[in-house]
């Protein structure tokens, strides 16, 4: 039997890699993919908790996370297309219209 | 021994592929690595007795979300993106923060204590089948969150069309 801690360590590793990508990459599409990576890491930990606690609620939560990820991808990519149409770049450093 | 070997293979491949996704130069290659990564994560779900979630992972993530990503990557002209630097200048700071976070999580995992177990044992799920068990729970106890999820999807459909539509000149 594989211990639960191994799964949680794997989940943490994937989450950390996604976090690193989101913080450091300049390409907005790769940043978006890093967010998906982080969501997947959370899904892994939810499923493994669900398996080891013999409870089904984690699976429901994963179901809802997948729904949110799908809608987030649709909206986010629409925003990226609209941005690219106006700025001709997928580079986050060039997007400074709001002077934040 | 064999389960540990299986898990070791999946863990190594998943971590390696996620690194390739994050570090890759070409976004198209990143999407392809991500496809392989999602298939491996689906395999891990099968390993954890979650066959319905594994199917969802392949159909929704690999089949729908990644195709959307691929379309957008191919739609945008990223020729000049390949020439400039991939990472921001202060990436060592980000590396430090993320590794500190990882160390913190691994220390916290040492002292974790699991709560009491529920009634969905492996034998119970085998007898009832996984899809039926998840469906029963989803349409009784979690009916309201399910409806909210459908509302979120409706908002996403309308929002994506409104945002990506070209402005008509009248």
Image (cartoon, coloured by chain):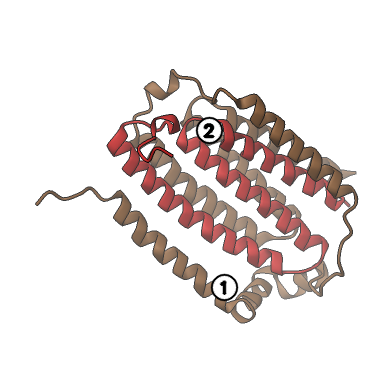
Chain colours: A red, B brown
| Foreground residue among B120 and B108 | B108
Q: Residue at x 66, y 25 (%)?
A: B92
Q: Between residue A13 and residue A91, name the one nearer to us.
A: A91
Q: Quadrant of residue A14?
A: top right
Quarter of image, res A82: top left
Residue A27 or residue B41, whichever sits in front = A27
Q: Residue furthest front?
A: A99
Residue drawn where x is 82% and y is 65% of the image: A53
Q: CA distance from mark 2 to mark 1?
A: 33 Å
Disc 1 residue crowd, few under 14, some 14–19, many 20+, Cα 10 Å: some
Image quadrant where one finds the N terminus of chain B: top right
On screen, residue A23 versus residue B161, left or right, reads right
Identify which residue is drawn at 59% across, 25% down.
Answer: B90
Q: Position of residue B57 (x, y in %)?
A: 59, 54
Circle 2 is placed at which residue position?
Answer: B30
Q: Is residue B27 above or below residue A52?
A: above
Co-location on one chain, circles 2 and 1: yes
**Which residue, given by chain and number where applicable, does mark 1 sit on?**
B145
Q: Report the front residue among A97 and B13.
A: A97
Residue A77: mark in rendering: none
Q: Nearer the viewer, mark 2 or mark 1?
A: 1
Would residue A70 be found to the left or right of residue B36 on screen? left
Is tag 2's residue or tag 1's residue first in the polypeptide sequence?
A: 2
Residue B62 in picture, x, y percent from top left: 53, 48
Which SS class for mark 1? helix
């Amino acid at each position: 039997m594989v211990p639960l801690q191994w799964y949680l360590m794997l989940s943490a590793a994937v989450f950390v890699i996604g976090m690193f990508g989101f913080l450091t990459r300049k390409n907005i599409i790769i940043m978006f993919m890093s967010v998906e990576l982080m969501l997947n890491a959370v899904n892994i930990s939810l499923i493994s908790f669900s398996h080891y606690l013999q409870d089904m609620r984690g699976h429901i939560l994963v179901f809802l996370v997948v729904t949110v990820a799908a809608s987030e991808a649709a909206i986010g990519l629409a925003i990226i297309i609209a941005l690219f149409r106006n700025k001709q770049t997928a580079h986050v450093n060039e997007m400074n219209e709001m002077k934040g | 021994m064999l389960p540990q070997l299986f898990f070791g293979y999946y863990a190594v491949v998943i971590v390696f592929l996620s690194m390739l996704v994050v570090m890759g130069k070409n976004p198209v290659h990143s999407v392809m690595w991500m496809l392989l990564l999602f298939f491996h994560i689906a395999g891990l779900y099968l390993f954890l007795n979650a066959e319905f979630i594994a199917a969802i992972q392949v159909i929704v993530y690999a089949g729908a979300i990644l195709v959307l990503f691929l379309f957008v990557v191919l739609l945008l002209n990223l020729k000049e993106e390949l020439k400039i630097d991939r990472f921001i200048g202060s990436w060592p700071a980000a590396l430090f923060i993320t590794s500190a976070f990882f160390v913190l999580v691994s220390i916290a995992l040492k002292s974790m204590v699991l709560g009491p177990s529920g009634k969905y044992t492996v034998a119970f799920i085998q007898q009832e089948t996984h899809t039926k068990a998840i469906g029963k729970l989803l349409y009784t106890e979690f009916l309201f969150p399910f409806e909210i999820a459908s509302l979120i999807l409706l908002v996403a459909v309308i929002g994506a069309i409104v945002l990506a539509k070209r402005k008509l000149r009248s």
